[in-house]
Image (cartoon, grey):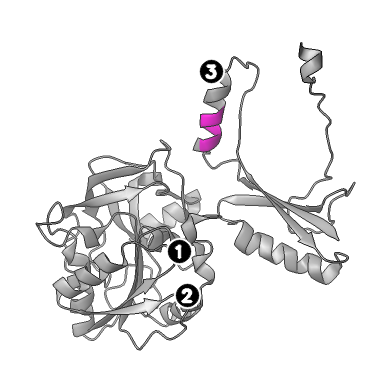
Amino acid sequence: MRIGVVTFPGSLDDRDAARAVRIAGGEPIALWHADVDLQGVDAVVLPGGFSYGDYLRCGAISRFAPAMDSIITAAGRGLPVLGICNGFQILCESHLLPGALTRNAGLHFVCRDQELEIANASTPWTRDYEAGQRIVVPLKNGEGRYQADTATLDALEAEGRVIAYYSDLNPNGSQRDIAGICNEAGNVVGLMPHPEHAVEDLTGPGVDGLGFFTSILTHLASGGSLAGAPQGANA
Amino acid sequence: MARVVVDVMLKPEILDPQGRAVMGALGRLGLTGVSSVRQGKRFELEVEGEVDEDLSERLHEIAASLLSNPVIEDYEIYEEGDEVACDCDDCTCEPAGVVDIDVPTVAEKA
């Protein structure tokens, strides 16, 4: 299984994302932001970091990268895409996911081992977890406060499109403790914390993050259909 | 040459922690009577030649897609020096009125 990891100018977690793919048993494929060619990958990870220095708004400039044109088109056809941290911000700026990530309520950059509750274990990126399962992965962001209008928040929760909540505490003031969401079809997932930093006991708080990367391999091995999409999905 | 200004502000309902931090500093500096501070961005675009209808339309597209995020922000666009800002229906433009605030010179203070 070939999982693409896109490097933007200023990405910093692309190598850890590739390593997580490898540890999970997949083949990471390095993709470059300026290339429209996705090299036929089976899924894409948009990694964390500070693409374009986070100038203008986080993810605002990356959204217009040539690779993103291809990814936006492919995601519309069902290509699984996982955006982590800055990747989540890029997905929101691309309008592949609703809402926006804004400055932390407390203004401080927050770096901690964060407990999450997996709320939707049926997306291609979360199917190896169980709904309600608590996991601990690192969180590190300055602009991670998830923000959307009330109608959008209601729809996300009603349709099972919140994939993870902050559970021990809300680190950044995210509305309704939202840590991650997915699109209507379920193939595009955005998550603020960093599962790719929790795939080996030696270098993280545990291996709780590995499930995101084994999930996508399980999904692809089973034929890659979106049958497990959240309720309300019409894809 | 014309200078087109795009002001971008967080929507009123969006929490602005940066503005709040500035507000806190005002209090520590002894300034009272300010009830709120909101922080935004200002872009100045130097345009060659006149701003015609086509360019104006294109500038609005850019302001609404790149310079601001309509999910969380509003923008205003106007030519600097304009008494009246653009007359389109797409933005929250208002006349670019200028308020002069007299700042005492060092000599006057002393």
Q: Is residue B19 magenta?
A: yes
Q: Amino acid at mark 1?
A: Ile
- Residue B28's tag is 3
Check chain identity for marks 2 and 1: say if they share one. yes
Magenta stretch mostly in which secondary structure? helix
Tell which of A41 and A168 is nearer to you.
A41
Q: Amino acid at mark 2?
A: Met
Query: Element type at marker 2?
Result: helix
Q: Marks 3 and 1, Cα distance to the nearest angstrom?
A: 37 Å
What residue is disc 2 on? Answer: A68
Query: Element type at marker 1?
Result: helix
Q: 10 Å neighbourhood of mark 3: few (<14), some, or many (≥20)?
A: few
Query: Element type at marker 3?
Result: helix
- Residue A90's tag is 1
* Residue A90 visible in image: yes
Q: Residue at x 9, y 57 (%)?
A: A201
Q: Is residue B9 magenta?
A: no
Q: Amino acid at mark 3?
A: Arg
Q: Residue furthest toward the bottom?
A: A40
| Residue A184, image x, y percentages | 40, 69
The boundaries of the magenta stretch are B18-22
Q: Chain of mark 1?
A: A
Q: Name above or below for residue B106 compared with residue A37.
A: above
- Left or right of A223: which side holds A189? right
